[in-house]
Image: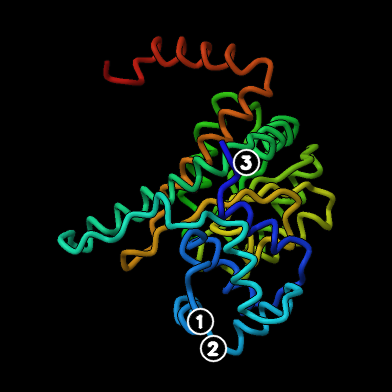
Amino acid sequence: MSESPAARLQKLFEGHRLTPTQRRIAHCMVRGAAEVPFLSSVELAELAGVSQPSVTRFAVALGFDGYPALRRYLREVAPAERVGVPEPDAEQNAYQQAVEGEIENLRRLVAMLADPGPVEEAGRLLAGSVPLPVLGLRAASSQARGFAYFAGKVHPDVRLLDEGGSMLADRIDAAVEAGASALLCFALPRHPREVVEALAYAREVALTVVTVADSAFAPVARHSDLLIPAPVGTGLAFDTACAPMLLGRVLLEAMADAIPAAQQRLEAFDAKAAARGLFVE
């Protein structure tokens, strides 16, 4: 599978120190990678919710003479036409359009996974950390809890960190003292300040931070050793996170593949569950 327009855009932004406003523009461009080469600077500014001069400064920050030069470059590296991006169906209601948006997010995840290297590396890091702290606060707490629940079936010691406060650093310290070498974080908008601070602290105490976030330009990026993006849907009043949830399951698979005793642990759990009558068959 060829590299997606979104992946090519992310490579363009790598290595540049961007301001928060510029990261917002970059995030917007990645989410609409197939459309961006056809947008004017005014249209991109409106889409990103910034001023038109901010778009011009952003292009200059990337090393171009201005936005027209950036757009010409994008048209050279992106498909010549808007392939595979369906136009919104005017007859669909808002709920249907939100679902269509999530389907498109999953397609982007498929394209990203064409290179399994980052996920496989993350799986090895997570499998090798005993214990394994899994962090997710507020909107991301359900993602972290779901991962921790299933991970506990194959990993010997998973520690869920889904509550903030002054004890969060204490729990990170306890994991390090018990032998942890990596931390997995789920970070979704709006990004809590506590998560950014917790990741900065985790790296201070020598943990390798693996992060699932909505964008490679999320505020947690600078405190992550390995960040794997999965977009969220914004078509409803509250964001939808189908792609981050599925990416979490993919990471579980990669981690289980890196744990020699994973299958044995699963079979042992199934035997105990049957003996205790845990599930209704």
Q: Residue at x 41, y 48 (%)?
A: 242
Q: Give how far apart the Cα atoms at labels 2 and 1 are.
A: 6 Å
> Callout 3: few (<14), some (14-19), or many (20+) C-alpha neighbours within 10 Å?
many
Which quadrant is home to the C terminus? top left
Q: Give the mark nearer the N terminus: 2 vs 3.
A: 2
Residue 198 appears in the picture as rendered: no
| Residue 222 in the image, given as x and y percentages of width and height | 74, 63
The residue to which callout 1 is attached is: 45
| Residue 17 in the image, given as x and y percentages of width and height | 76, 71
The residue to which callout 3 is attached is: 159
Q: Amino acid at mark 3?
A: Arg
The residue to which callout 2 is attached is: 51
Residue 79 appears in the picture as rendered: yes
Q: Residue at x 78, y 63 (%)?
A: 15
**Horizontal side of residue 151 vs 73, given as left or right:** left
Task: Out of 58 and 125, give the one closest to the viewer.
Answer: 58
58 lies above or below 82: below
Q: Secondary structure at mark 1?
A: helix
| Residue 160 in the image, given as x and y percentages of width and height | 58, 44
Task: Out of 144 and 211, give the one closest to the viewer.
Answer: 211
Q: Amino acid at mark 2?
A: Ser
Q: Amino acid at mark 1?
A: Ala
